[in-house]
Amino acid sequence: MRLPLLLKFVVALTSLCQALSVSNTSIGAVTWDEYSLLINGERAFINAAEFHYQRLPVPEMWLDVLQKLKANGFNTISVYFFWSYHSASKDAYDFETGAHNIQRLFDMAKQAGLWVIARPGPYVNAQTNAGGLALWGSDGSMGKLRTSDEAYHQAWLPYMRKVGQIIAANQITRGGPVILCQVENELQETTHEPNNTLVTYMEQLEAVIRDAGITVPTTHNEKGMRYVSWSRDYGNVGGAVDIYGLDSYPAGFLVGNRCDGATGFNVVRTYYQWFMNYSWTGPIYLAEFEGGRTLTWGAPQNYDDCRSEHSTTFVDIYYKNNIGQRVTLQSIYEGYGGLIGAILSTPDAYSWVLKNQDTQATFTVLQQNETPSTTTIAFSAYLNTSLGNMTVPDIQLQGRQSKILVTDYKFGNQTLLYSSTDVLTNAVLPGHDVLALYLWESQTGEFALKTPRNLTLQVYGASIVSSTLHPGYQKIKYTQATGSTVLRFTNGVIVLLLDQPTAWHFWAPSTSNYPSPRPDQKLIILGPYLVRSASVENEVLQVSGDNNGTTTLESFIGDVPIKAIEWNGQRLTATKTPYGSYTAQIPGTENRSVILPSLNHWRSADSLPEAQPEYDDSRWTVANKNSTLSPQAPLTLPVLFSSDYGYYAGAKIYRGYFDGTNHTAVNITASGGLAFGWNAWLNGHLIGGHPGDPNLSATNMTLTLPGPHLRTMNNVITVIVDYHGHDETNIANGAGNPRGILGAYLLPGGTRTATGFKLWKIQGNAGGAKNIDPVRGPMNEGGLYAERLGWFLPGFPASDNKEFNSTSSPLDGISKSGVRFYVTSFDLDIDRDLDAPIGVSLSAPNGTIARVMLWVNGYQYGKYVPHIGPQTKFPIPPGIINNRGRNTLALSLWAQTHDGAKLDTVELFTYGLYQTDFQFDRDWSYLQPGWEDRSVYA
């Protein structure tokens, strides 16, 4: 899988992790003070990345992502657990099938060397359907959500008990990776009253968590600086958690918010003050911090248009800004000492100085006063060291650049008295203490080593270096050249001077699977696109990783003789450099390719036979309820809310019957989530609908009933209502807001109770809440005819099915309104040592008003709405797609107007090509159950 751009920057947080390194025992308590967490009694800097397993329903690929996170400097993952994903119906829970098996996630996190912050909800938000609440409660049966309402309490209680027991079994105190457990999510405590329903709710949750055996500290995440919720230090009337956290998205949460590359980059400089005011006895914890943006329906820009807003510059500015405010727990969403002043000789720079109370090292964080600035400024810094005050000249911030200057920073047996260059990391190798520093090319750096005598150094590389001895220390000044320069001192110290692009290909793989390894449990490797692991065995350096361009792998392993370097199992000649590293040329993929087949040989069939009046709906659910538990009253009776009849996810289809030719119109109100659409047909003839609006989750239309199409008896209006999810609770009533038809009556004469209809029937996903496909889960399919019959599943015999009497393709489309379903298959033969991330690209002619869904091997993995947009490219991970072998691809094309619809692009593409030893080619059959006859659901 492709390594996200943000993760290619090994952030300076690793320096602080080293300064706060912990002992290597995996069983111990987690405590805290006002500075940081203490794990096994020693300080830990938590550098976390959010990971949502349900969005990658291939457990084997979890390890791929976790290894990449670990390689890029993260030591923790933060994980939501989704009630909706594990409970398709009341009293039914699945923590074992396929990607529902979260024990595998805990095991892989431990294997990858990552701690886990568990966030079980029951509400998680997460930009997911209903905020993660079980969809079976969308009928209103859960009562008032996210309160102490007893109906809601009884609904979440069994789930929290079950997931809590799994989390408890995986705590660090039991040898697992879990170090924190979050209670609820962004639950705003707007009033501080002990009898408030939210206080009772939090106390209920905390009691269940503790009863389940969870003993690690509890946390919560404040939704921005709006209220103060569940802090032990401020307004604590009950329900407070152990460690208060704050969520912050300072550059904007949505794609399209100031996403032009020229604006933005305005940092928040009040985190420290916020915590000192509201949570002063705990560490500063940013439970969610911006690492990307959410793409909404109808967004003016796509992800690729916003790459500049989350480049390595973003990381440099924003994450170092957090460090400057003494943040010691930070979780990047999504992804995946005391404070004193400092004096600088320019009013254009801004700084903080932090002092580690244990080591006395200081960290001075520098950035421009106006962080959006792209100008270059130069200045001097005055640093307080153990040998007195030092003036460091010629410090430069090149536009949107931040730096962390250190003093009295210990590495191995050495002390870095000061440095005006960022420390990337350090390592203790046999015979050598190693320090890595980075700068932009042509910038000037200066550092000093504490030493009573002059150390001779040899320079290997193009950087211009000078050295002078001073009382108690030796000062080295240099101008950074392209690439790397190695300084080797007579006392065995090695200093790597790296320019930024070289630093992006710097790796420090751990020889331990402990999340925060000691400096003597690292190797250093330069060059590859990714290094997953490295070790020396039998005089061979074995390196596992990914690479896209032929390059030199350079390894620093200390005074350990080796005969060869083995890259992804390929033995290569190792050449020793004059300064003691070993190099080898590793292969890239420049001369390799992947042949992606054209998507031809389609077969297609009508997927809207329900529009015809003679369609047999005798096995459909009769919609005849006259009352509902929903917090929203129906506009007409009977109740037509889909959840009241056990149909939660996906499109719903209704058939309403009436007699006579006197009615001239029908008024329909439908709901399906933002940008959803719907259509209605009278006796097989389109009478209209709504194309969708990204700002509306419910729409109303009065549609004319053409006289020539009316019958004296048994007229049928067929309505398809699309589905874009249930609401999160930032919308009043949240998941309780109904989906489907909210009301329908005939004109003239129709009323709320006498609508003119004599019968309504509804059909949704096959089996409703039965979850007949537990592997793919309860939110994978909806109620389209093709979905109910399983035409999208691998092994469906389209060529033998009488309904597939056409070889038309999506490029041919349909000439009128309706829904057509297309199925094809293709073979891939990607070399086993290649990672070739694959996607499907879709496009349609301008003016097309249609809705398209995409399935690959039975997984609904893309939705394209050309008249709303913006997404047109849909990545398909291994395990969903078979890198070697047969694949089934299916498309539904719903034309919303009389003009019909067609696509002009349906093609496979690759995001890149990487040589790897990760096993992307596997037998994925257990995740891809095939077609079985589903005619009972027609």
Image (cartoon, rainbow, N blue to C red):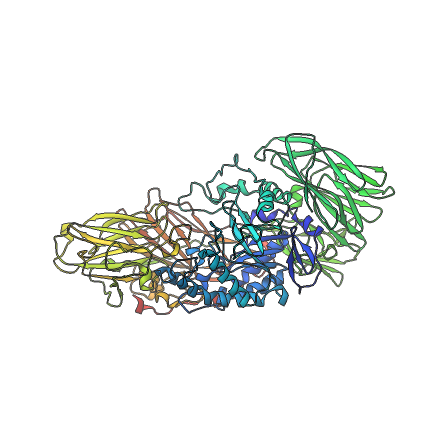
Placement of the C terminus among the 4 image quadrants: bottom left
Q: Is residue 528 left or right of residue 774?
A: right
Q: Is residue 446 visible?
A: no
Q: Residue at x 83, y 42 (%)?
A: 457
Q: Nearer the viewer, residue 572 or 659?
A: 659
Q: Residue at x 42, y 43 (%)?
A: 299
Image x and y of residue 701, in percent: 25, 47
Against 392, residue 198 (above or below) is below
Q: Is residue 869 left or right of residue 160?
A: left
Image x and y of residue 115, in percent: 61, 59
Which of the 4 image quadrants contains residue 655?
Answer: bottom left
Q: Nearer the viewer, residue 758 or 594?
A: 758
Q: Is residue 313 left or right of residue 445?
A: left
Image x and y of residue 44, in percent: 67, 54
Image x and y of residue 261, in percent: 52, 36
Which of the 4 image quadrants contains residue 153?
Answer: bottom left
Q: Is residue 244 visible?
A: yes
Q: How many dots with numbers? A: 0
Instruction: Pick out the residue farthest to the right.
Output: 453
Placement of the N terminus among the 4 image quadrants: bottom right
Q: Is residue 854 left or right of residue 171?
A: left
